[in-house]
Each structure stands twice: as structure tokens, then as C-alpha cells.
Amino acid sequence: MEKLQEHRQEMLRCNRCGYCQAACPIYDVLRREPMTARGRIQLLRAVTEGKLPLSETLSRLIYSCTDCQSCRVSCPGGVHTDEIFAVARQLLAESDYAPPPLTELEERVRSSHNISGEPPESRLLWAENLEARPQGLVGKESAEVVLFTGCVSALYPMVYGILQDLVEILQAAELDFTTLGGEEWCCGYPLLSAGLPVSELVTHNLEAIKSLRAKTLVTTCPSCYHMWEHNYAPDFVRVMHSTEFLAELVEAGRIPLRRLEMRVTYHDPCDLGRKSDVYDAPRRIIQAIPGIELVEMEDNRANALCCGGGGNLESLDPELSRAVASRRLEQARSVGAEAVISACQQCERTLSMAARREKIRIRVMDVVQLLRMALLKEHSQE
Ligand code: SF4
Ligand code: SF4
């Protein structure tokens, strides 16, 4: 409670103008004032004043949020809604009202070191059916580049293709790379965003990466990237999201490209765009591919609509998460795109599932997969 009290001044800065309402994907679906940042702040103020006790209802409401931070960027007064809500989630996570799916998630991560509770050796299952599995994908003493695979990319078959295509591109560019294999632990982001402690995970991953003496850490996951860049902040390795890394390779002429005739749109993942300020690198890659036409959706860059997959919402309220995803997909469809390109395996999952559900004919893929499609014939199977 003390921490929430410390944020009381920040809450008092909210003048109830309502700009955050128009930006909130949850309000957009549910049309309920308590779901807006303004509404949540009023409730949390009442908690700090002792007028409202913590409860299951409050917990459900606070966690019904994709942590997309649209409210933060749309607030004219610059209220740090992200910090207020993070502290509220910490308070609830420590209370009797922690949502059961988050308690189960925590148990899985603490015991198996990944979000799905699988054994550590499953971390490399995605590499099983690579055309040519590179030597030293695991077990190397050192490498120039280390891939931090992330739990979703490495453990959810639906998105194995992102890491598989990344590896094929790195092979084509003749790079020296490796992974931590089963020694990679969850980066901690899902726990941190639920309000739970992550120091054990951070310490382990920092030590494991340091021992590889790599120059660059590359991850396709915006959440892992955000954790490494902002929370781990190592001084011994350069942290790059795959889009930043690949944009440099493309611009250095190390990835020979063929023509792809396609009209595509780009969906900015919240953790990569609004939270990490990476907007240009993915667009630079897309625009470097000859024949590609990039069209922007109505809400893009800092104003991009969330895909519904953030903030653990998918496990807490799958229906709400799906409704948000459908709205984003509709924006992609309305600009006549043949494909919606993202740079996040979670966005790819939520948007693909929405396309299937809504029977919308649109491809959903990662920038890495688009780039792999464009690899010149001699490097490609196409
Ligand atoms: S936009 Fe900012 S100041 Fe306005 S109601 Fe929302 S949080 Fe409060
Ligand atoms: S973080 Fe996103 S979902 Fe949560 S209150 Fe703010 S705008 Fe709404």
C-alpha cells in the first residue's frame, strides 16, 4: 500500500479530461468507464484514501488491461499511468486477490523457467525441422551473436517459423551465432507485468549470456527486448531487437533480396513501439524489399491499436483479448492489405487466430518471415 501511496501525487495529476478513453482498446470493447485509465485512477485513489478495499472485483478490473500504454501516450498531462498501474498490480499480486491464472503462471515459470511449464530441452524443439540445422546452435563456448529465443517463439509451434526463418537468414549472411538452449530462462516480463518479482531470472540470464562473450544479443520478442534493454541493461553486450539487427544487415547488403509483389501493412507491437520506441527498423526492412507496397493503418506508430495479446490478458480473459484482436485486424483489412506484418510472436498469434475466427483472408506474419520470403533464390527454397 505504501508504494501506491507514493504514487498518489501522480494520480492527483489526472484532471479527468478523458483523452485516455478514446485510446483504450479495453474501453473500446466494453464501453465501461472504470476500464479507462481515468476510471482506474479514480478507483485507485479511493484505495489510497481508505474508501475502497482491495477485492476480487477490483483485481479483475485492474488486470483487464493489455498494458499497452496507449493511455500514457495519449494523456496531454503526461500522467504516468503505466507506473500507477504497475504498482497497483504489485499490490494485488501480493494480496489475496491475485488472479489464479497468474499464480499458476508464476508457479510454472519458477519451476520450469518458462511460461508453458515444459522441460528445458524443449527450448530447441523449433529447430528440429530446419532444412539445415546450423552447427553450434547450442553448446558453443562463444559466438559473435547470441539469440535469446523467448518463451513464446521457442515453445509455441504456431510461431516456430519466426526463429526458423531468422536462423536461415543468419546462415545466408554467414554469421557466427548460437543460443543458450535449455539454459535460457524466461526473461521475466510476464511476471514483472503481473506485478511479481523477477530477480532470480534476471541474475541467471545475465550470467548465462555473459559467459558466451557475445558482442550482440538478438531477440525476435519485443517483451524480451524491452526487458533486456530497460531492466537488465547489460554493459557487456549490445541488445538488439531482430528488426534492428536485420535492418542493419539489409542496409549493409548482406541479405540479397528478390522481388515480392505484395501490399502489406505493419502492426506496431506495443512493447516494441510505444514502450521501446522502435518504429523505423521494421519499416526500413519492409521498404527495402523490392515490389512491396507498405500501407499504414489508421492507428499506427505511437497510436497503434493493441493486438489484445499484452498484459497477460489472453490467459486472464481470452474473450476480451480476442475482441481487441478482431478490431485491430479489421483495421488491417480496411486498408486492403494482403498481409499484416508484425514484429512480435504474440501479435502474430493473436492476429492469426482472429483472422481464422473472423474468416478474413489476410496473411499474418513477422518481419523476419517476410524477409525470409524475399531471400534470393540461391539462399531460398522458393
Ligand atoms: S488523459 Fe490523462 S489526465 Fe486525462 S483523464 Fe486520462 S489519465 Fe487523466
Ligand atoms: S494500458 Fe492500454 S488497456 Fe490498459 S488502461 Fe491504458 S489504454 Fe487501456
Image: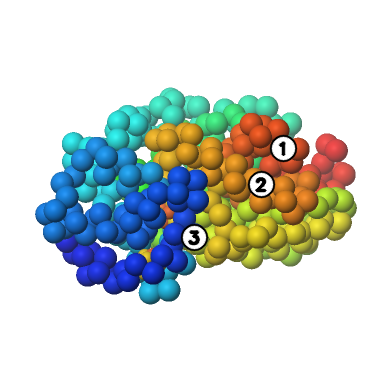
User: Where residue 207 appears, x then y in whole percent?
Assistant: 37, 48
Q: Are marks 3 and 1 in contact (CB under 8 Å)?
A: no
Secondary structure of residue under mark 3: helix
- Residue indicated by mark 3: 22
Front-most of 63 and 292?
Answer: 63
Front-most of 187 and 176?
Answer: 187
Amino acid on which disc 3 is placed: Ala
Residue 245, numbered label: none
The crowding category of the residue bearing disc 1, from other C-alpha atoms within 10 Å (few below 14, some 14 to 19, many at least 20), is some
Secondary structure of residue under mark 1: loop
Q: Quadrant of ligand 1?
A: bottom left
> Residue at coordinates 61% horizontally, 60% vertically from top-left?
299
Amino acid on which disc 1 is placed: Ile
> Which marked residue is nearer to the observer: mark 3 or mark 1?
3
From mark 2 to mark 1, how far is it between C-alphas? 9 Å
User: Where residue 34 appears, x then y in whole percent?
Assistant: 34, 51
Q: Up-down: is 378 above or below 73?
A: above
Relative to 215, 352 lies left or right: right
- Residue indicated by mark 1: 360
Give the farthest residue toward the left.
50
Secondary structure of residue under mark 2: helix
Q: Is residue 194 visible?
A: no
User: Where residue 251 appears, x then y in whole percent?
Assistant: 74, 65
Residue 330, numbered label: 2
Q: Is residue 37 visible?
A: yes
> Residue at coordinates 21% horizontally, 40% vertically from top-left?
55
Quarter of the figure with residue 356: top right
Which comes sooner in the sequence, label 3 or label 1? 3
From mark 3 to mark 1, how far is it between C-alphas? 26 Å
The crowding category of the residue bearing disc 2, from other C-alpha atoms within 10 Å (few below 14, some 14 to 19, many at least 20), is some
Q: Are marks 2 and 1 in contact (CB under 8 Å)?
A: yes
User: Where residue 285 appears, x then y in whole percent?
Assistant: 72, 59
